Amino acid sequence: MATLVADKVQVLGNSGVLAQGNVLIYFGGKSLTASSVRYDQQGDKLMIEGPIVLQDGDDQVIFASAAELSGDLRNGILQSARLVLNQQLQIAAVEINRIQGRYTQMNKVVASSCQVCAKHPVPLWQIRAERVVHDQQERFIYFHNAQFRIADVPVFFLPRLRMPDPTLTRATGLLAPKIRTNSAFGTGLLVPFFIRLGDHADLTLSPFVATKSRTLEWRYRHAFRSGDLTFRGAISDDSILPGEKRFYVFGEGTFALPLDFKLKFQLQDVSDPGYLLDYGYSDEDQLRSAIAITRARRDEFIFAGLTRHETLRADEIPISDQLPFAQADLLYERRWVPGWVGGIASYQLSAQSYFRESSEDQLGRDVTRLGASFDWQRDWQLDGGAIVKVETAAQSGLYWIEQDSNYDTEQSFITPSAAVTLRWPFSRVAANGTLDVIEPVAQLVWSKNAGASIPNEDSTFVEFDEANLFSLSRYPGFDAIEDGARANLGVKWTRTSPSGWGMTLAAGRVFRFDGAENFSNASGLSGDQSNWLIAGQIQFGSQFAMQGRALVDDNFNIAKTESRIAYLSDTWQLGAAHLWVVADPQEGRADKIHELRLDGAYQINDFWRISANGDFDIEAHQATRGKLGIQYSNECVKVDFSLSRRFTASTNVKPTTDVGLQVELMGFGGSTRGKARQCAQ
């Protein structure tokens, strides 16, 4: 049914209807406005005088001066017309012919997504064509005898050109090319080609031809009803390693299985240690391929997985056969509330194996472990607001150790633990609404490791922070457990202001009374007294945030410190991160680490944006990496320029400089429209 609204409607006998003045017609999801419409009942056609606006759905609008259309608005001719797709791409034509409500055929066409003003009548770019056909159902635009122009200067000619309209986000065809210059493999052009393999899969092939390299990059994606997977990689023939085929393959996927189980996998492989850095594909220095099945419920967790490791570090490659290359893990954990004592109880069953390729004694050690643990904890609130928590635990393990004469082949241990924790928070509210909360915490812990010495495979690096200050054991794995009696003391002060800023400051320390420990100096936990753990953060609304953590001894010697700061506004984005760690042979680090990372971006105006970041090795007195990016974006074009430099070198890679330039025309294939320029500018 059609709806007609107008200032004046006149019935012309049996021949039709004449509507004049602010005419508005609704029919079949289409709307038409005009100054005058005459309906010929015998021919079932409309003679329309403009200005005309024909709205077909949410994504297509036609403007015209005059038209002759069928009664259902599906067929006909519009004169001096302009088609606008998704409020982005404009196609002006001498004549537009609508066919079957699906095809829009245009003659003598100018297409552009650039804004045209009286002061700037020439668009930044345009496509001129003798004829253009828009398939509204397939959402493709076909250009015949097309000429691409920049600032009205012809650049190239194509007899046939097919492009997706702005509403189509996945379509087979070329993507925006990129010019790239690298000091290692020269200057080249990257031309991505997207291949749509149905509604749920696609393949992108990106040949890169440079003066010293021939590379094919690729990416495959597939979405299933129960999950998805992605594979990407590249293969190269270059002058860096002449005569060798260099490649990498990365893949990952997640799938839902019955009974709430999930399957996850990860694949990483590379032809040589320097390939990823040479081409900038990844900063990974260790490859990890794994498959795992997990299930996480409110009171239960299950994990089973296999992992393969491969190092790319120059200092580890010569001894790679002495490092674990394969790992198998099983874990089952369950939690419940015991009705007879209350609180929360849990138990854990686990198994783990490590394998090395070397068959030499000690250097090729293989380890298999079976473990079980139990934990129970409960807290009570006392008068005055103090909270007392009691926790007991027991952990046991059975080990089989091969190819290491320093250890017995079969060993076992059991470690009981107990802890009592007292928390006493104090709070006050100031007259201006500021809330202060001070919470001192004291914890007494006892544990006893009853068993022989076993190799430590999974707890070689220990982080001492606010999260584990009051833990029964600060070792992250199963092989090492804290031993003896100790006291964990700490205090935290939190302030929250109604004006939008807040801060937290915490300090803590561990005191040991007996028992053996094997913590590294860098962990801050070695000795009878640990370093002071000092941590804090401050935040002003959503614009500024700063946080840091330090491990300091009584003589103000720092074992480790790390800090981050960030500032975010409409025009500025600034960030910095700092890290300092002492040298520690026990952690395999002969020199201390002193690094600084800076990054920032500035939105100069609505169109220009500049960004930069850099990594600095302060200990070595040199920059390790730097990057500069400049972006221009408006309603019809986006230009990205980047300049990066890697300063460090090793036996695998050399310092390189990389320059990239990419230009993308907006208005095609679901591109994101930038801010439009103003005609007054």
Image (tube, rainbow, N blue to C red):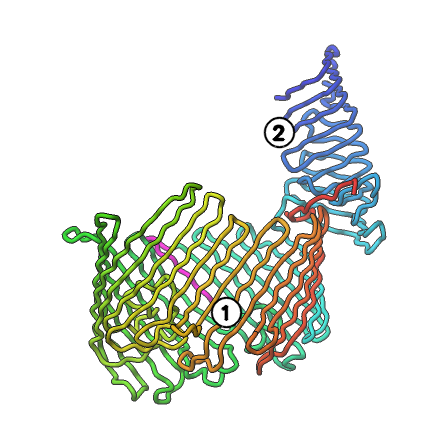
Membership of 513 in magenta stretch: no
Amino acid identity at mark 1: Leu
In x, y percent, where is residue 592? 49, 78
* Magenta span: 257-266
Does 316 appear above or below 493?
A: below
Q: Which mark is residue 579?
A: 1
Q: Residues within 10 Å of mark 1 (few under 14, many from 20)?
A: some
Q: Could you tell me how far apart the alpha carbons at marks 2 and 1 are, in whole angstroms?
A: 61 Å
The reply to whether dot 2 and dot 1 touch (C-beta < 8 Å) is: no
Q: Regarding mark 2 in the picture, which secondary structure is present there?
A: loop
Amino acid identity at mark 2: Gly
Q: Nearer the viewer, residue 303 or 509?
A: 509
On the rendered image, what quadrant is the C terminus found in? top right
The residue identified by callout 2 is 29
Q: Which residue lies furthest to the front in this view?
A: 431
Question: Can residue 188 be spotted in the picture?
Answer: yes
